Amino acid sequence: MNLYQCELEKISRLNLPWGNFFGRTVMISGATGMIGKCLIDFFMLLNTMAQTPVKIIALSRSKERAGERFSSCWENENFRHISCDVNREIPECGKADYIIHAASNTHPVQYAGDSIGTIASNVTGTGKLLDYAVSHGAQHFCFISSVEIYGENRGDTEKFEEQYLGYIDCNTLRAGYPESKRLGETLCNAYHQTYGLSFTIPRLSRVYGPTMLPSDTKAISQFIKKAAAGEDIVLKSEGGQMYSYTFVTDAVSGILYTILLGNPGQAYNVADEKSDIALKDLAGYLADIAGTQVVFQLPDDNESRGYSTATKAMLDASRLCSLGWKPQVHMEEGLQCTVEAFAEKKNELN
């Protein structure tokens, strides 16, 4: 059994009130993305030990991609995929007790190439799903947010706590992602005030793992794909940026902690403090795994327009840890697992 599967099983054995989910329906937007895929893998595993299983409604735009990502559970009676764009009316899917909104553009090429869609999924899409939650009596809404909402570190803190607000130049293309995530959070508060809808907001650090999509253009994703191919790791900056990272199963367990144990209306940082690392050191780690070297290359104009300008973006996850959450997979082990998974996929295609 590989690390990813082992970690999913560990989550299922955590002393959490899983009974809140049993016999209920969970709707997940962005189902084919890195987080959505891991969430659904977990719930399908949880169902193997449940007398009254969790029913999953998986929302994504591409039925073809969903069929590939969820081939193992496509015919399962507790899994249903709905092809839709969350920026339009959500199709009638029946009752949804829990809604997890994980649909969003999440990497530089998407920010630059689909700037309107980036904003829409975090604002219009959030509003559509909140409307569905209210009209269908959902117990809880979970909005997946991001370290990006903190903007640039103004040099007055080592790590971002949940109340920190850094600088964002809103009159830029790149601001579309963090500003729309901020507004998505505000929308959740508005629906709580107006309709009494319970919600929590996990703010994820940079997440990686074997459920990453090959199309992902974040720096760590590009490094991992290069390492899996046995190629040199291409660094497109000096690499001094300090970031927090989290392995995907730890990110998902953090999300589940906020839903099951978090205070309604609260935001929670999700980050593994043992995986805070400079970008150049991350590149070095992966070059060592691949047996290659790090080389420097300037990004093209399209990429650079979508890049974050933050040079220090680390999260303080103390609030989440106070609920009992602990990250299990740290950088070296997580990277090795992810590179092996991508190398295996590459070999299968060949």
Image (cartoon, rainbow, N blue to C red):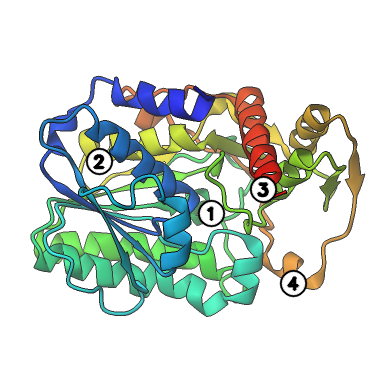
In the displayed structure, 302 sits above or below 147; it is below
Write down the residue under mark 2: 259
Residue occupying image coordinates x 58% and y 37%? 245
In the displayed structure, 145 sits above or below 270; it is below
Q: Earlier in the sequence, mark 3 or mark 2?
A: 3
Report which quarter residue 61 is drawn in.
bottom left
Q: Do the residues labelled 2 and 1 touch (CB within 8 Å)?
A: no
> Which amino acid lies under the numbered mark 1 shown in the image of this protein?
Glu
Whole-percent x and y of residue 241?
A: 73, 43
Write down the residue under mark 4: 302
Could you tell me how far apart the alpha carbons at marks 3 and 2 are, in whole angstroms? Answer: 28 Å
Residue occupying image coordinates x 29% and y 21%? 14
Whole-percent x and y of residue 325?
A: 36, 25
Write down the residue under mark 3: 221
Mark in front: 3 vs 4: 3
Q: Can residue 231 be seen in this view?
A: yes
Report which quarter residue 124 is drawn in.
bottom left
Left of 200 or right of it: where is 107?
right
Could you tell me how far apart the alpha carbons at marks 4 and 2 are, in whole angstroms? Answer: 37 Å
Q: Are marks 3 and 1 in contact (CB under 8 Å)?
A: no
